[in-house]
Each structure stands twice: as structure tokens, then as C-alpha cells.
Amino acid sequence: MSARAAARLEGLGFRRVYRYTGGKADWFAAGLPREGREAGTPRAGDLARRDIPACLPDEGVGQAWERAQAAGWSACAVVDRERVVLGLLRARALTRSDPSVRVEDVMHPAPRTYRAGASLDGPVRYMRERGLDAVLITTPDGVLIGMLRRADAEPYVRETDAGGA
Amino acid sequence: MEEVRRDGVQRLVQEGTQLVEVLPAREYQEEHLPGAANLPLSELTRETAARLDPARPVIVYCHDAL
């Protein structure tokens, strides 16, 4: 639709017309500001806690655990140097692994992530079904935004929307 | 017409480029990008386009690439 609109504007004499191919879906998924009647309804990125600690895959688990503890978390996102999510260290791996073990050897390599623009019912349903307390939130490019806690999201979700009773 | 990505949109808007959502008004009213005007494609005529400044660049967007 935007391609046709851009062509139409050019036909009307506008000389510099750009087309944002990602559109609203891309903008919202990146957790960027929104305006409008529904802009106050929180999405996953709005409630994601940005203080989730992060570590590199070649760090030692001991370092990651110290960082997580200092930040008050029992999990640590594993990211590359561009902060693209590579995995997740959950409490069990953090506390039960030899501190010298490399993060990449004990991390969960494929944690479920949600985009910042996701409505809350999907993540809440996923966490309930798997007994999880939190999920990672990223941009469409996989860059870490934060961690969405189930306790933060549940108050905003109707039971019927999240597959509850 | 030139295609831009998210970072390009942010830069161009800061430089004064006009941002236009071409989806129907109902979708625009629900949520849109900050500062965007609404010119639905179905209503895009010479008269409605006159709301825009022809001397400044324009970015158009809809929901996604489709």
C-alpha cells in the first residue's frame, strides 16, 4: 500500500518521497514511541525490564552470576557485542555450574523471544503453559530490549486472552 | 522513490521530513508513529495531498512491507 501511495505522491509532483518498508509493524516491534487512542495500552516492550543483566558467550559463568546478583536478577541474557540475543542463562545454570565454565556451554541456546510490539496475551500464555517467570524481549533485529516478567504482564491480560480459565 | 529503514526514518524525521500514514483513519487513530499525518491511500488526491508541504520530503508507511 505504501508503494502505491509513494508512487501517487510522486505523480502529484512531490520530488522526494521515501517509503518506510517496515511500517508500523517494524516500528512498534522495536519498542519505539507510539501515538493514538491505543498507545496507552501496554505492549511487551513497554513492560520489559531494561535492567536485565547481559553477558557474552565467552565469559565465565561465575562472572555472569556475580553480575546477575548485583542487579537483583537470577537470570542473565547472553548477547553478542551488538547486543543480539544468543541465549539465556537461567538460575539453574548460573548457580549449579562451575564458575569457570564458559557461558555458551551451559546457556539455553534458543530461548523464546517476543518483539517489543507484541500484545501481552501471547507472552503470558507462553509463560503460563511452560511455568516460566519471564521471557526476553527484542527488536526485530534480535537486539535485546529487556525481560518481560509474568508478574508484571498478567495484571493487564484478561484470562480469556491468555488461555486461562 | 527510495526505501528507508527504521534508522533512516528517525534521521529523516529529525531533519524535517514529513511522515504520512496511508492506512485508513480508523487504524491511524488507534496507533501511529509520533507526529505522523494521515492520508489514506483511498483518499489520496491532489486536494488531500495539499495538506502536505511539497517543498519538504515525505516518508509514507503502512502496516508493513505488503
Image (cartoon, helix red, strand yellow):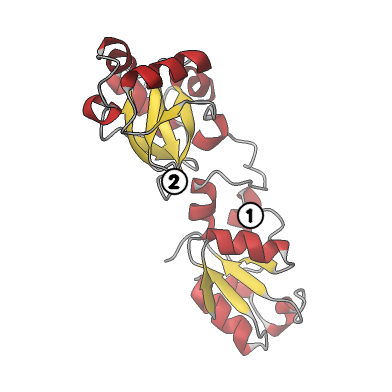
Q: Horizontal placement of B57 versus A108: left or right?
A: right
Q: Quadrant of residue B46?
A: bottom right
**Relative image position of residue B8 (x, y in whole percent):** 58, 64
Q: Horizontal placement of B13 versus A147: left or right?
A: right
- The front one of A26 and A163 is A26
**Relative image position of residue A46 (x, y in whole percent):** 57, 34
Q: Residue at (46%, 19%) from the top-left corner?
A: A67
**Relative image position of residue A76 (x, y in whole percent):** 40, 24
Q: From where the camera sits, is residue A133 visible? A: no
Q: On the image, numbered disc 2 is attached to which residue?
A: A82
Residue B12, relative to residue A5: is it above or below? above
Q: From where the camera sits, is residue A78 visible? A: yes
Callouts 1 and 2 in the same chain: no
Three-letter code, disc 2? Glu
Q: Which mark is residue B33?
A: 1
Q: Residue at (66%, 87%) from the top-left corner?
A: A12
Quarter placement of the C terminus of chain A: top left
Crowding at label 2, few (<14), some or many (≥20) Cα neighbours within 10 Å? few
- The front one of A72 and A64 is A64
- The front one of A1 and B56 is B56
> Label 1 is found on which chain of the structure?
B
> Label 2 is found on which chain of the structure?
A
Q: Please, what secondary structure does the residue beneath circle 1 have? A: loop
Q: Horizontal placement of B48 versus B33: left or right?
A: right
Task: State how far apart marks 1 and 2 are (Cα).
Answer: 26 Å
Residue B34, relative to residue B39: is it above or below? above
